[in-house]
Amino acid sequence: MKLYIAEKPSMGRAIAEALGIKEQTKTHIILTNNDVVTWAFGHLYELAEPEAYNNVYQKWTLDSLPIMPESFKRVVKNNVKEQISAIQKLLKQADVVINAGDPDREGQLLVDEILEQLGYKGKVLRLWVQALDKESVLKSVKNLEDNTKYKGLKLSAEYRAYADWLVGINLTRLFTLKNSARALIRVGRVKTPTLALIYKRYKEHTEFKPKDYYVITNENKGISFVLQNKGLDEKFLDEENRIIDKARALETHFEAKEHSPPLPCSEKCLAHTYAEKIQVDTSKKKSYIKDIFIDRKQIPPPMPFSLSSLQKYMSSKYGWSAQKTLDTLQSLYEKKLTTYPRTDCEYLPEEQFPDAHIILERLKEVGIDIQGTDTKRRHRAWDNSKLSAHHGIIPTKDTSNTVTMNDNEKLLYQEVANRYVNLFREPYVYNQIIIVAVINGYEFKAFLKQIVNLGWKTNYQDKEDEEQEEEQMVKGIPFRKGENFVSGESKIVVKQTTPPPLFTEGTIIDAMKNIHKYVGITGNTNHNGNTMEDYKEILKEVQGIGTEATRSQIIEDLKKSKLVLSQGKALVPNTGLVEPIMMVLPDELKDPLLTAEWESLLAQVEKGDHEKAKEFYNKQVEFVRTIIERHKDREAVQVANQEKKKNIRDYQRSGTNNYGNNKPSNKKDWSNKNGANKSGSYPSDKPLSEKQIAIINKYAPQEVKDAIKNGKYGMGRKWLDEWFSKFQKKK
């Protein structure tokens, strides 16, 4: 008897329906050929808590750290004993077992660990199925492989779990015990840098000081020309060549605006006067067309969705959470309507290209518009050399369950189907036109777009695209090169610089996947001789931190623990809980540099270099030991006044966002009596205000920053006094 073990009941039923059902029970299904399909409920086992190794670990103490099990124990999860018992009985009857877990790391591990825990020693094959429609299942059944081929997947998932346990258990206990308020400081190998990313963006956004700048325009024949600032008086231009009041911009550079050093009045407020002069010089003046540039652009239809690109798209267009997109897509997958959801790949297998005409016809039957398609048109998406273990998300040939879709499923299915249909439409073609005009010696440019063929965009609307459209739409070019004309009235448009946008669930998923763009490290090298650029390349190669399968859950966990709050589409940190965490934790836990190195090793394990698993684990042990040794005997970090100790725990339970709202007077913060006692020394145990810490983090030398991170606030106060006194002398 062949025993199929699926990841969950719905998948087990889908496999059984494809193979033929004879009899169904609560725990398994007997097939018409007397083979059996059973299932798990996700992971049936979990790693044991520390006290399972030794009762001494029930109490959180520094002396008990680090906690390093010689071998990890697994325990049965709640409410699954009946299913485990059923699987155990079936294993005794099986001639061969077929691992039918999801086609990913966790799917591989959760079935393999069942077999290990139950002591099964027989033959095991692997069913690798990308879609649950009957044709896909039957095709995969004919191509079963030896389960040992996928050992790398199992090991990478297993050792990732060990790493998360080591880092989470040990460092959560360490930093909870090493802060003055004993606030719970949760540490996660991927969650912590993700939280730091959200917090850093929030601070950049809320502390941003907008600056006015001036744009000069001139309209002719209905076309708006914009002054090109290159070559203008640099006294009035910033680093991006914008006309700006530099002195005013300098004011906003300092947090304590009223205590900024004296500013040069000769430059103050003159930029607008300068702009007015140019306005007069270019109004109703002799002009000519210096040049016209025409560049034909051809934009192919977008690639099929990966999970992260779909989550980003649904967040932007509909405000969906990442988890909502994944849950809805999982439901469509289980209804056999779309392919495997947790994919990191946007490419498609070349052998599936001939299926296009069938899929398009089936989509047409259920109301999807396929006008303008041509199944002979081959998009670059079909490329076997670019495939990972999975392929892009597309509709299957089976549309029978579309009648069972709810509203969310209908919307998501429509988007997935439209993206697939567009692959067979013509490219979007337009002319990008730049007209260069010289008005009384000043150079202006007009940026135009002339559509040649809408192609796939005929059936496509995206508000984000429209908002980003900068070119003026024209049907023809109303000027010729060398043409003379008299300019119109120039106008001064006052604009403001804008802060970096807060992360949404879609953009944080994208940032996690492309984390190499966000890596920040002081200096050029890190341990092992790697440079920041080395780490960026590693992160880029392994596609960031987390995986397609785990990123949305990481965000959900941050929200459930009330560390991150939703404000409309935006994600913001619950500062009452997050600021103590950011203050207490060292940089290496907040920056994904080590995650880059670890993910690189796990990727090698997955590809078959099994020895890297031990190397990976040893690095976790070394890292955790080093952090504990470095911080164990240090003074506890001050995160709140004594009277606020209880409140921090209250905030953890309630999720309120009020902690740290202490606003000392400017006089106390910024006078040159910045906490010094009569002898001239600075007490190290008195916490700094948020404003003081912000100034130090932005302007102080690294040794001062390191000092306050380790609770040595006296050095910070001394530096603040010296920093402020320099400005006082200039007044």
Image (cartoon, rainbow, N blue to C red):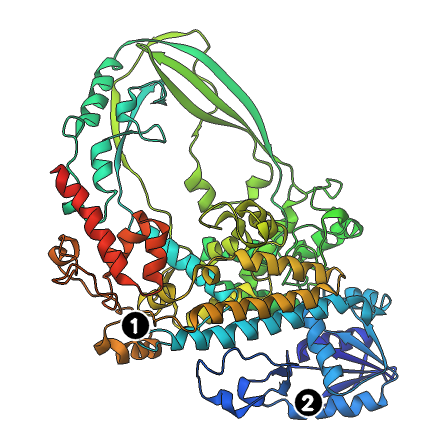
| Residue 535 visible from this viewpoint | yes
- Name the element at disc 2: helix
Res. 68 image quadrant? bottom right
User: What residue is at 23 percent from the left and 45 percent from the top?
Assistant: 254
On the image, the x and y values in percent for residue 141 come to 83, 69
Number of marks drawn? 2
- Classify residue 186 as left or right of residue 89: left
- Classify residue 605 as left or right of residue 502: right
| Residue 401 visible from this viewpoint | no
On the image, the x and y values in percent for residue 683 come to 21, 65
User: What residue is at 21 percent from the left and 18 percent from the top?
Assistant: 277
Q: CA distance from mark 1 to mark 2?
A: 41 Å
Could you tell me which quadrant the N terminus lies in?
A: bottom right
Relative to the observer, which residue lies in front, 541 or 529?
A: 529
Q: Which amino acid type is marked by label 1?
A: Thr
Residue position for label 2: 83
Relative to the observer, which residue lies in front, 300 or 232?
A: 232
Could you tell me which quadrant the C terminus lies in?
A: top left
Q: Which amino acid type is marked by label 2?
A: Gln
On the image, the x and y values in percent for residue 647 come to 26, 78
- Classify residue 378 as left or right of residue 276: right
Res. 411 image quadrant? bottom right
- Image: 540 above or below 474: below
Residue position for label 1: 656
